[in-house]
Image (cartoon, rainbow, N blue to C red):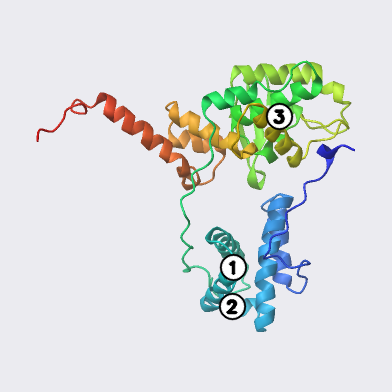
C-alpha cells in the first residue's frame, strides 16, 4: 500500500462542529463565492467552513440571526472562543474569517454595515520562522540518492522548494509545461489561483530538465503532474512532508522542520545575500508586504553588521 498516494485529510480543529452547518444560506453562498470567484483551495475552503460553522453554532445557541449581528455579539463570540481555550493566533484567524464574511454580506446588500470593522485583532506574540542555515540546507539537499528514480525525484523536489521558495501545494501542483527551460522560470499557481513567474537557479534547472527527460517516464504517469508517486499519480502534501522529515533526520538536523521551512530559508537567505524586501515579496507571492515583514529581523541584523563594519566611528571607544 502506497501511503504517498493518500489524500491529506484536514485536521479536525477543536472548535469545529461535528458536521457542516446547513441552516445558514448566507454562509453557503459565501463559501460558494470563495470557491468559484476567489478560487480557494480545498484546504482553505474547509478552514473557512469550520470557522463559520463554529460561529453560526454560537448564534443558534443565542437564537440570533446572521443579519442582526452587532459588534457586541462578535466580541461575545470571541470571548466565548477564548474561554474554550483558543490561542490568540486562532482567535485572529476566526476574526479574519468573520471580517471577510461580513464584508461580503455588506457588498451583496445582505447586511447593513460590517459589525467586525472596528474590532481589534488579538495581540500576537512575535514568532520568528524556523530557518535552516546554508550549511544545513546544503547537507539536506545532498541526502537523496541519485541512482534511482525515487531518490532523483526527491532531490528535484527539495531543490525546487529551496530554489523557488514554493509552498508545498504549489510544488505538487506543478505540471511539465509550467517549466520554461529556455528562460529557467516556473509558472506557479499560488493562493487564490494567483499566477506568478518564479526564476530558479541553473543547478535546479538542470536537475528538473534531467528528471523530466529521463526519470519521470519511469513512474508510468497517470496524471499530468511533474512529481509522481509509485502509482504514477500526483504526490500528496503528506508525502512531501514525510520526505523532508526523512532527509532532515539523515542530515543530522534535529529541529522540527517541514516543507515550509524551505520557504522561510529561501526568503531569509535572499535577504542575507542583499535582496530587498519588495523583491522577496514578489518571489514569495505575498499580496501584502506586511506578510513578508516577518523576515525583517534578518535584514536588521545584516544592517547592524554593515553599520558596524563601515561607519567611521564604529570602532571608537568612549573615554571614561
Left or right: 52, with 147 as reference point: left
Q: Kindly identify the residue that appears in the image at 62 percent across and 68 percent down.
A: 105
Mark 1 falls on what kind of element? Answer: helix
Mark 3 falls on what kind of element? Answer: helix
Give the answer, above or below, for where 94 lies relative to 111.
above
Report, in whole angstroms, how far the alpha carbon at label 2 lies from the one at label 3: 46 Å
Depth check, front residue: 273 or 318: 318
Tell me if label 2 and label 1 are in contact, CB under 8 Å.
yes
Mark 2 falls on what kind of element? Answer: loop
Choose top left, top right, bottom left or bottom right for residue 237.
top right
Disc on the earlier residue, 2 or 3: 2
Task: Find residue 267 and report its horizontal and vertical position in percent.
Answer: 51, 34
Residue 87 badge: none
Tell me if label 1 and label 3 are in contact, CB under 8 Å.
no
Report, in whole angstroms, how far the alpha carbon at label 2 lies from the one at label 1: 10 Å
Residue 178 badge: 3
Residue highlighted by disc 2? 69
Task: Find residue 283 and report its horizontal and vertical position in percent.
Answer: 55, 34
Choose top left, top right, bottom left or bottom right for residue 51.
bottom right
Report, in whole angstroms, how far the alpha carbon at label 1 lies from the one at label 3: 37 Å
Q: Kindly identify the residue that appears in the image at 70 percent across and 63 percent down.
A: 50
Quadrant of the frame with the N terminus:
top right
Residue 102 badge: 1
Amino acid at each position: 500500500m502506497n501511503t504517498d498516494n493518500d489524500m491529506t485529510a484536514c485536521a479536525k480543529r477543536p472548535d469545529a462542529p461535528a458536521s457542516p452547518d446547513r441552516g445558514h444560506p448566507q454562509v453557503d453562498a459565501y463559501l460558494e463565492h470563495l470557491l468559484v470567484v476567489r478560487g480557494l483551495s480545498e484546504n482553505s475552503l474547509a478552514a473557512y467552513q469550520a470557522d463559520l460553522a463554529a460561529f453560526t453554532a454560537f448564534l443558534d445557541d443565542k437564537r440570533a440571526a446572521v443579519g442582526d449581528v452587532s459588534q457586541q455579539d462578535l466580541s461575545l463570540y470571541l470571548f466565548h472562543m477564548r474561554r474554550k481555550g483558543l490561542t490568540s493566533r486562532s482567535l485572529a484567524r476566526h476574526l479574519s474569517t468573520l471580517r471577510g464574511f461580513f464584508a461580503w454580506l455588506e457588498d451583496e446588500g445582505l447586511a447593513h454595515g460590517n459589525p467586525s470593522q472596528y474590532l481589534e485583532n488579538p495581540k500576537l506574540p512575535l514568532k520568528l520562522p524556523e530557518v535552516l542555515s546554508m550549511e544545513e540546507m546544503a547537507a539536506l539537499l545532498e541526502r537523496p540518492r541519485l541512482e534511482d528514480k525515487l531518490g532523483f525525484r526527491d532531490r528535484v523536489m527539495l531543490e525546487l522548494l529551496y530554489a523557488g521558495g514554493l509552498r508545498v501545494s504549489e510544488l505538487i501542483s506543478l505540471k511539465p509545461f509550467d517549466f520554461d527551460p529556455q528562460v529557467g522560470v516556473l509558472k506557479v499557481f499560488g493562493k487564490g489561483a494567483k499566477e506568478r513567474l518564479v526564476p530558479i537557479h541553473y543547478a535546479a534547472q538542470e536537475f528538473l530538465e534531467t528528471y523530466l527527460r529521463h526519470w519521470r517516464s519511469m513512474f508510468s504517469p497517470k496524471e499530468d503532474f511533474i512529481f509522481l508517486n509509485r502509482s504514477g499519480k500526483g504526490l500528496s502534501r503528506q508525502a512531501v512532508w514525510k520526505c523532508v522529515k526523512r532527509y532532515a533526520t539523515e542530515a543530522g538536523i534535529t529541529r522540527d522542520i517541514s516543507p515550509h521551512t524551505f520557504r522561510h530559508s529561501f526568503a531569509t537567505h535572499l535577504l542575507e545575500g542583499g535582496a530587498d524586501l519588495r523583491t522577496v515579496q514578489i518571489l514569495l507571492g505575498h499580496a501584502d508586504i506586511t506578510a513578508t515583514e516577518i523576515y525583517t529581523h534578518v535584514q536588521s541584523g545584516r544592517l547592524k553588521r554593515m553599520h558596524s563594519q563601515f561607519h567611521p566611528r564604529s570602532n571608537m571607544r568612549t573615554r571614561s
